[in-house]
Image: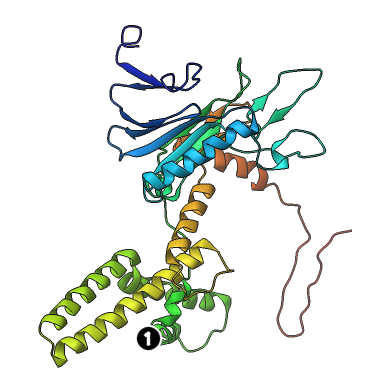
Amino acid sequence: MSKVCRGWNFTSNHSEDADGRIILIWKDTVAVRVLQQSRQSVTCEVKLPGSPQFVFTAIYAENERADRNDIWVELLSLYQTYSFDTVPWILGGDFNQIIHPAEHSLPEVSSLTSDMGSLFTWSNHRPEDPITKKLDRLLINNPVLTLFPKCSAFFHPTLTSDHCPCTLDLATKIPAAGNRPFKFYNYLTKHPSFNQVVIDAWTQAGDTVWNLTALYWKQKQIKSDLKHLNRENFSQIQVRVSEANRLLLDVQVQALNAPSTHLFEMEKQALQTWNFLRGMEESYFRQRSRVNWLKEGDQNTTFFFRMVQTRMNFNFIRSFLLPSGVIISDPIQMSVHAVTHFQQILGPSPAPVLGMISYGWGGDRVQSCNTT
């Protein structure tokens, strides 16, 4: 490889199978270490420049179902051997099977499409009997979402192959956000000062509300004070929980080594603070995850956090497909296109000319709204 393409390296699974069909190619700037290879997979550690290390498994599954069973045994073994529940793990390739009837192109089975490229990734290219299926996938575990929260995969047209090539983007740039809309978090109601903060903010602009303008300013004042309450007590909630846990552990060690009324009281207060912040953290991620079927208070914070990561990744707009077929991903171009698009739909149009309307109070009435 280095003789043909200077600065490039490769590995394959030919050592495990003379008919091996998996080849991995990378540049010198990328560090790759093969962990395991077999007839149907190659697993390696990958270190990109300026990026944390992750594990990638390339898959090329057998055509026969009985032979494909081996790949699932291998993946389970890898998961247990290398503790892939805590290591960023990406799997991609041809799994050679569908997992749902909707992943078959028969009209009576499915009519679905995808916004991340074609739903179907394999085509038989036979005009007399056209069939497409979803045989290729790119899978990730939760640590990958933590490491690359905006990662995405896009399946391209097949060109000369019967399979769609897939592009994995780990370095999607996040556009700078403007002013974020106000969000009311339920955990604020559990703060001891919540009621008083609302009362003070409401009465600050007067005791009564006599029009919508006054109501607007009262609500604006409440919003400002609640944002301050949240910022002062719950901002960076994960850091606060971690710090509260550290303080609790420190005082517990001191109380064990030199028991005293003062240290035991400090331990009690530290435990209360830690439990309180843990509850706030769980409430925060539960609300953001929009999962309603789990009971709050059962310490499902980890699950809620993962759901938040998944939702953020799913909702993130990475590109626009223009009517011309061109895909744009530059944040500035995307913002201009979005504004133009909605101006065309919602933009102002000349209003019809109506007759004069005279509004009066008391016994006066609307004189006329139409002309004849």
Q: Position of residue 239 (x, y in %)?
A: 29, 64
Q: Quadrant of residue 343?
A: top right
Q: Position of residue 4 (x, y in %)?
A: 35, 7
From where the camera sits, is residue 152 visible? yes
Quarter of the picture containing the N terminus is top left
Q: Position of residue 251 (x, y in %)?
A: 17, 78
Q: Position of residue 320 (x, y in %)?
A: 56, 36
Q: Left or right: where does residue 149 sit relative to residue 315?
A: left
Q: Nearer the viewer, residue 226 or 115?
A: 115
Residue furthest right in the image? 372
Q: Is residue 78 above or below residue 15?
A: below
Residue furthest bottom in the image? 261
Seen at 26% across and 71% down, the residue is 245
Seen at 19% across and 88% down, the residue is 264
Q: Left or right: where does residue 79 sit relative to residue 362?
A: left
Q: Is residue 100 above or below residue 363?
A: above
**Three-letter amino acid code of the residue under disc 1:** Pro
From where the camera sits, is residue 149 visible? no
Total marks in image:
1
Q: Quadrant of residue 160?
A: top right
Seen at 44% across and 39% down, the residue is 90
Under circle 1, the secondary element is loop
Seen at 77% across and 58% down, the residue is 354
Q: Nearer the viewer, residue 367 or 81?
A: 81
**Residue at numbered disc 1:** 192
Sort mark 1 into few (<14), some (14-19) or many (20+) by Cα contacts within 10 Å: few
Q: Nearer the viewer, residue 240 or 64?
A: 64
Q: Is residue 270 above or below residue 314?
A: below
Quarter of the picture containing the C terminus is bottom right
Residue furthest left in the image? 258
Q: Nearer the viewer, residue 323 or 307?
A: 307
